[in-house]
């Protein structure tokens, strides 16, 4: 196989085909039959009459003669400059998910002398946007970013960085890393279209909220709101993230002011989220006599996938005021509370909080083994989003309970914590 590959580099493709055909004891007629390429076309290639045969012609012949695909392509891109041929090779490499070939062909495509560099990078960018495979898209965006950065093509540097960020932000295990990568785009927003700029501000704002960078969330969402005059779901969700960030840093008056604007959006989730947020404001102000009835009212009306947020707020209040009977009553509705898909950082965090509250109640009620299991589930939920602060707080809860009650941690509990630690470490190593 290596001899064949080397020969392709040093002789014409026609000579290689003839030599390998004869070595395989195939006649022109037989090769034509097996490859689907006419006998006349093969003959012209072998005799050198067709100096630059089309790749689509060579490909089936190479498959029959077992010529390495990568070597065939590399022999083409050594001499090929025609854009249509290079694009055909690029599409073929995309289909085969061959990233090593992909970068070589894409770079050759960008270096073609037949069109201006900006036209070529535009074509490659548009082609990349249509690729479904995330890894392949990332590989091509990386090339576009590098090429644009080296040549000062700021518009495509900005576009490439944005598209790369929009893919990488979906990896819940790397939220901090992808956010830092997204921050580079802040230097190039003037080179993005208005629509791209709005998407960037809102997606980064939601991202900032998920990793508890609340001030950055507010700034990014405000920048997006200043640009976006339309009404759409992304805008509404970003506005809600901004309101939640304001809530979490204690700016309650501003929360109530922003809620009046937020309530003008006409999406299904707006009414219940606004109602819940108003109740949480009362809870944050420790106005429990008003907060609890408002939260209870939300519990009766809220959708199943949002129920856990109401329950967590109530559990937090009941545990703080020592109403363990109400905590127990809520925990008995667990089948309804946990009836949602855990597919966002916020939902992972909510699940972690629920089991943390459940564990705290079980410890207080003397159900030590059950409490340890709940904390174990909480730790794993937080581990899914690398919520290190919450993981530390859970561990402190456990140690504090045993210290406060003068209890020694038994061997079984230590083993449980060790299992959780090992699972968290395995998840971290996979990042």
Image: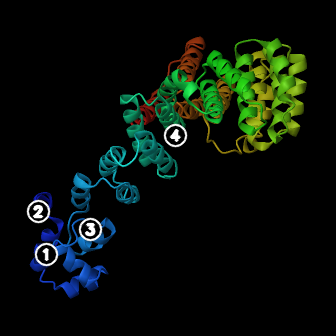
Give the label, 3 or 1, closer to the camera: 3
Whether residue 222 is visible here, answered yes or no, is yes
Where is the N terminus found, in terms of image quarters? bottom left
CA gap, disc 3 and disc 1: 14 Å
Quadrant holding the C terminus = top left
SS for dot 4:
helix
Which mark lies nearer to you, 4 or 2? 2
> Which residue is found at the position 22% from the left and 71% from the top?
50
Q: Are marks 4 and 2 in contact (CB under 8 Å)?
A: no
Secondary element type, mark 3 = loop
Q: Residue at x 80, y 27 (%)?
A: 325
Marks 4 and 3 sit apart, C-alpha to C-alpha, by 38 Å
Residue 11, numbered circle: 2
Between 132 and 346, the residue placed more toward the observer is 132
- Identify the residue under disc 4: 167
Name the N-terminal-most of marks 3 and 1.
Answer: 1
Q: CA distance from mark 4 to mark 1?
A: 46 Å
| Nearer to us: label 4 or label 3 | 3
């Amino acid at each position: 196989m290596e001899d064949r590959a080397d020969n392709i580099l040093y002789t014409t493709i026609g000579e290689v085909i003839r030599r390998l055909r004869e070595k395989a004891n195939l006649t022109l007629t037989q090769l034509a039959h097996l490859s689907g390429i006419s006998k006349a076309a093969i003959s012209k290639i072998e005799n050198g009459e067709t100096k630059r045969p089309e790749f689509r012609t060579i490909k089936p012949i190479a498959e029959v003669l077992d010529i390495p695909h990568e070597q065939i392509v590399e022999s083409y891109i050594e001499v090929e400059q025609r854009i249509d041929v290079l694009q055909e090779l690029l599409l073929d490499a995309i289909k085969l998910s061959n990233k090593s070939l992909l970068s070589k062909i894409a770079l050759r495509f960008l270096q073609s002398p037949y069109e201006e560099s900006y036209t070529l990078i535009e074509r490659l960018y548009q082609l990349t946007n249509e690729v479904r495979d995330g890894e392949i898209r990332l590989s091509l965006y990386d090339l576009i970013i590098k090429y644009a950065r080296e040549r000062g093509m700021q518009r495509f540097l900005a576009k490439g960085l944005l598209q790369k960020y929009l893919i990488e932000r979906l990896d819940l295990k790397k939220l901090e890393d992808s956010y830092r990568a997204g921050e580079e785009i802040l230097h190039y927003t003037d080179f993005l279209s208005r629509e791209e700029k709005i998407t960037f501000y809102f997606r980064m704002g939601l991202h900032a909220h998920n990793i508890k960078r609340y001030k950055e969330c507010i700034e990014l969402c405000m920048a997006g709101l200043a640009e976006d005059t339309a009404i759409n779901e992304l805008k509404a969700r970003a506005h809600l993230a901004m309101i939640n960030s304001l809530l979490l840093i204690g700016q309650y008056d501003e929360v109530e002011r922003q809620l009046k604007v937020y309530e003008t959006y006409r999406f299904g989730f707006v009414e219940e989220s606004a109602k819940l947020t108003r109740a949480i404001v009362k809870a944050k102000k420790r106005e429990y006599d008003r907060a609890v009835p408002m939260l209870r009212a939300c519990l009766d009306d809220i959708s199943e996938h949002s129920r856990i947020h109401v329950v967590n707020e109530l559990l937090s209040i009941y545990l703080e005021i020592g109403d363990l009977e109400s905590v127990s009553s809520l925990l008995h509705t667990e089948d309804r509370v946990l009836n949602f898909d855990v597919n966002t950082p916020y939902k992972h965090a909510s699940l972690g909080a629920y089991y943390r509250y459940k564990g705290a109640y079980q410890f207080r009620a003397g159900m030590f083994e059950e409490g340890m299991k709940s904390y174990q589930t909480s730790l794993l939920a937080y581990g899914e989003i690398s919520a290190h602060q919450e993981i530390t707080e859970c561990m402190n809860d456990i140690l504090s309970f045993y210290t406060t009650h003068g209890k020694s941690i038994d061997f079984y509990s230590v083993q449980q914590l060790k299992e959780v630690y090992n699972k968290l470490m395995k998840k971290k190593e996979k990042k």
